[in-house]
Image: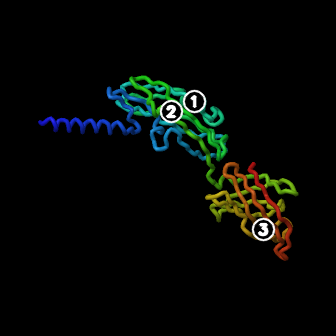
Amino acid sequence: MKMKTIYKIFTFVGLLAVVSACFDDPGTDILLNNAAVIEINEATTAGGLDVSKSYNRVTDGKRIKDSIRVNLVGPQKSQAITVNFTVEPTSTAVAGTHYALITTNTVSIAANSSFGFIYFEVIDDNILPGEIWKLKIKLTSSDGSTTISSKYGEFTRSIRTLCSFNRANFVGTYSTLEPGYGTYDNVSIADPANANGIIINNFWDFGGVVKYTFNPSSTAVTLPTQDVVMGDGVTYVVAGSSPATYNSCTYSFVVPYTVRRKSDNALFDTNTHTFTKK
């Protein structure tokens, strides 16, 4: 083989080595000596080291269970691996208020396995939509001839909540505020003719039975124009106006309205009802 050809081969191999060193994919912290590293799975994803997650908020006193996956990158071990972690003091999420650890400050990767989980609970009742609480996890040490990834050993779960519309939550007893008049009770039931509707009694504190319709894709609620026979036996026309809104987290809703007598269109009331779930 000519010297010039040998020089070209070594030059090509050298270029491959340089190019290969420029690329760093998640899960590639394995050392050449066949050692293994421990990393947080979500830290290696497109979301990066701080991943936001929304949890459906239901004010029911219950918590939402979740987990963060911890990976063994490299050969599986014949014995379980214990990985230690801490919740960083820079976390804004408060233990016992916004979250609670189920897993202690260690997570186990079972023998002949490649991952384990840090389990925790989100205390969704205490987190209002729009709030962001950061739970920062840092892997600190491990055993079983493994090391903590220098790039993917830390991770932040940014905790958010949202409240999806559920008609069942709007069924029950309400305290109804009518400014200038007072507060009184109403009872609502599901409207069998409308999947997103409820029927509420004692409208206007005068025995009227009216129908409301909720828009699941927004926070709007409608009081359609309808005839209502009140407690005096007279038929009135009840109509809602905007903005009429509901809150899927508290199950409250606020609806401006008018009441007219049907026989002569006489206006009896223009006001707003604020319904607060008991």
Label for residue 154?
2
Query: In the image, which is nearer the foreground, mark 2 or mark 3?
Result: 2
Residue that badge 1 annotates? 88
Give the mark nearer the N terminus: 2 vs 3.
Answer: 2
Lateral position of residue 225 relative to residue 261, left or right = left
Instruction: Name the residue nearer the viewer: 249 or 159.
Output: 159
| Secondary structure at numbered mark 3 | strand
Compared with 255, 2 (above or below) is: above
Picture coordinates of residue 185, whole percent (x, y): 80, 54
Q: How is the image coloured?
A: rainbow
Among the 4 quarters of the image, the one containing residue 246: bottom right
| Secondary structure at numbered mark 1 | loop
Picture coordinates of residue 109, whole percent (x, y): 43, 29
Compared with 60, 263 (above or below) is: below
| Secondary structure at numbered mark 2 | strand
Picture coordinates of residue 265, whole percent (x, y): 83, 74
Between marks 2 and 3, how big is the CA–CA gap? Answer: 58 Å
Q: Residue at x 73, y 63 (%)?
A: 242
Instruction: Name the residue nearer the viewer: 59 or 193.
Output: 59
Is mark 3 in CB contact (under 8 Å) with mark 1?
Answer: no
Count residues near mark 1 (Cα–Cα under 10 Å), then give few for <14, some for 14-19, many for 20+.
some
Lateral position of residue 5 relative to residue 274, left or right = left
Residue that badge 3 annotates? 238
Q: Residue at x 63, y 50 (%)?
A: 163
Lateral position of residue 182 relative to residue 80, left or right = right
Among the 4 quarters of the image, the one containing residue 74: top left
Lateral position of residue 210 relative to residue 36, left or right = right
The quarter in which the N terminus is drawn is top left
Q: Amino acid at mark 3?
A: Val
Picture coordinates of residue 114, whole percent (x, y): 40, 33
